[in-house]
Amino acid sequence: MLVAVLFYTFATILVVAGVGVIISRNPVHAALSLVLCFLTSAVLWLLIEAEFLALVLVLVYVGAVMVLFLFVVMMLDINVEELKRGFTRYAWLGWLVTAIVVAEIVGVIVQRRLGLDVTRGAVPLPADYSNATELGTALFTRYAYAVELAAVLLLVAIIAAISLTLRRRRGLKLQDISAQVAVRASDRVRLVKMKAEPRS
Amino acid sequence: MITLGHMLTLSAVLFALSVAGIFINRRNVLLLLMCIELLLLSANFNFVAFSRYLGLVDGEVFVFFILTVAAAESAIGLAILVVLFRERRSINVEDLNTLRG
């Protein structure tokens, strides 16, 4: 009973925050609604006992990705008025598609039942079950190559992001360290022999 | 008791909301990226739910990889957005007409 109440409460918060993401005009409000979405999703994942992924969701999404989004939103000087123009022209189409998609998916779940029993709860896990252990065992045995590929993917993403945003400004004064190290005294000081000038 | 049907329905609602968001916010690249994040979250919901209710841990491993790909995608997407804003002083999709698409 308590679990059901918690589920419906957080599911409602999740849907309301999702609506907030898509209809808010201000990108900062949209980003904060998205943070709320991720937090409530983490709570729902905790409720169905996927603890490790819930924590990863909070750490990676709320802690890193959304902070990145907020940084970009605040760095860019976006003209919100310009983007608001024509806001509602395709809104009806969006809501129509939403209604159709929800009706279809719920219809499939309720009517066809996906070939399995969708109305039963999950089998309760034993008290000494560790989600992190299970996940780690699967990741580092059966999915070891996939983990390495994911690591390479992240490296590529880092390099791509940095090389995209790196820029050289014109007129910027930079140190050329190899030239500074390779310099010799003869490049800097020229000793000139000359006769002493007569005292006037 | 939370059943598989509950989780799948919630995920469907979230998915449909993000698709609607892509229709509604089709001018603003930043909000489009956020809607894609929401869409991936709803896909993750399905993976987590099926993994829990079928008793297989593989679904959660896939959520792990989806999180990785989504983080990489948003990092590169935001980098492209920053470069775009530097060039055009705008993030409106309709200003992206150099290729005459």
Image (cartoon, coloured by chain):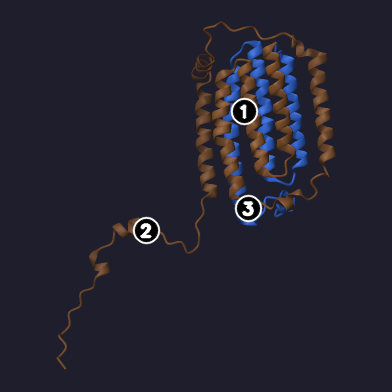
Chain colours: A brown, B blue
Mark 2 / mark 1, whichever is N-terminal:
1
Q: To which residue does mark 3 refer?
A: A77
Chain letter, disc 2 residue: A
Q: Quadrant of residue A178?
A: bottom left
Chain letter, disc 3 residue: A
Front position in the image: B81 or A120: A120
Structural crowding at the residue carrying mark 1, measured as other residues with C-alpha within 10 Å and reported as few (<14), some (14–19) or many (≥20): many
Percent of width and height locating residue A193: 17, 79
Direction from residue B18 to residue A167 in the image, left or right: left
Q: To which residue does mark 1 refer?
A: A39
Residue under the image location 71 percent in, 46 percent down: B28
Residue under the image location 57 percent in, 36 percent down: A65
Whether B8 is drawn above or below A99: the answer is above
- Kind of residue sitting beneath label 3: Asp
CB contact under 8 Å: marks 3 and 2: no
For the residues beneath circles 3 and 1, the answer to whether they share a chain is yes
Direction from residue B49 to residue A63 in the image, left or right: left
Residue under the image location 25 percent in, 63 percent down: A184
Gap in angstroms between the C-alphas marked 2 and 1: 48 Å
All told, the count of numbered labels is 3
Dot 2: what SS? loop
Percent of width and height locating residue A136: 50, 18
Q: To which residue does mark 2 refer?
A: A176
Mark 3 / mark 1, whichever is N-terminal:
1
Whether A119 is drawn above or below A89: the answer is above
